[in-house]
């Protein structure tokens, strides 16, 4: 089945190269960016400014191909790609939670953003953890358990080119 999507806007950040970027929003604390929404989708921004955070879903447009086993940035062992947040995925979809600073016309000003400049935006969803019981009592996070703190300081390199 062929699935087609269209970009609803463009993400703008200070990151012009993949190498050296933060690998998660927690490592991009304080880094500001903007999301420019295409004119035909501006009405969809109504009431977004009353939320503090959003999920942004985007196309990892500078990643070619995919790998089913990868060595993620935060570990020295290989794992199945679906057990990681590696960008080298079959459908090249990325997502981040970012803080909204303000919504102004067709521009959403955000911070804590770990996305490459010029990235095509696919969707925005409000971050509402209690809505769907996103807080999980018996959570297991696999190999991330011993590595998740690295996300604050780990930077991207060329391993997924």
Image (tube, rainbow, N blue to C red):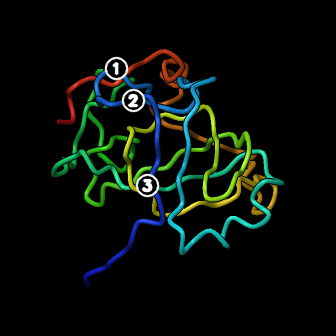
Residue 92, horizontal then vertical, whole percent:
31, 54
Q: Earlier in the sequence, mark 1 or mark 2?
A: 2
> Tag 2: Cα neighbours inside 10 Å, few (<14), some, or many (≥20)?
some
Q: Earlier in the sequence, mark 2 or mark 3?
A: 2
Q: Which residue is mark 2?
A: 15
Q: CA distance from mark 1 to mark 2?
A: 8 Å
Query: Disc 2 on helix, strand or loop?
Result: loop
Q: Is residue 26 above or below residue 102?
A: above
> Tag 1: Cα neighbours inside 10 Å, few (<14), some, or many (≥20)?
few
Q: Nearer the viewer, residue 88 or 56?
A: 56
Residue located farthest toward the bottom when viewing the structure as drawn: 1
Q: Nearer the viewer, residue 38 or 114?
A: 38
Query: Disc 1 on helix, strand or loop?
Result: loop
Q: Is residue 26 left or right of residue 131?
A: left
Q: Is residue 124 left or right of residue 95?
A: right
Q: Quadrant of residue 161?
A: top left
Q: Earlier in the sequence, mark 1 or mark 3?
A: 1
Q: Which residue is mark 1?
A: 20
Query: Disc 3 on helix, strand or loop?
Result: strand
Q: CA distance from mark 2 to mark 3?
A: 15 Å
Residue drawn at (53%, 27%) of the image: 145
The N terminus: image quadrant: bottom left
Residue 149, horizontal then vertical, whole percent:
55, 19
Residue 59, horizontal then vertical, whole percent:
36, 55
Residue 18, horizontal then vertical, whole percent:
30, 30
Q: Is residue 127 above or below residue 117?
A: below
Residue drawn at (59%, 40%) of the image: 140
Contact check, label 1 and label 2, Cβ < 8 Å: yes
Q: Nearer the viewer, residue 67 or 138?
A: 67
- Closer mark to the observer between disc 2 and disc 3: 2
Q: Which residue is mark 3?
A: 58
């Amino acid at each position: 089945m062929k699935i087609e999507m269209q970009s609803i806007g463009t993400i703008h950040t200070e990151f012009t190269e993949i190498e050296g970027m933060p690998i998660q929003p927690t490592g991009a604390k304080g880094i500001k960016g903007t999301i420019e929404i295409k004119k035909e989708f501006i009405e969809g921004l109504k009431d977004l400014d009353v939320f503090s955070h959003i999920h942004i879903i985007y196309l990892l447009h500078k990643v070619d191909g995919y790998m089913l086993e990868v060595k993620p940035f935060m570990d020295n062992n290989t794992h199945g790609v679906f057990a990681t947040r590696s960008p080298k995925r079959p459908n090249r979809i990325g997502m981040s939670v970012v803080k909204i600073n303000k919504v102004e016309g067709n521009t959403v000003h955000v911070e804590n953003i770990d996305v490459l400049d010029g990235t095509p935006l696919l969707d925005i969803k409000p971050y509402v953890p209690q809505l769907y019981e996103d807080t999980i009592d018996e959570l297991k996070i696999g190999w991330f358990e011993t590595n998740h703190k690295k996300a604050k300081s780990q930077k991207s390199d060329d391993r997924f080119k």
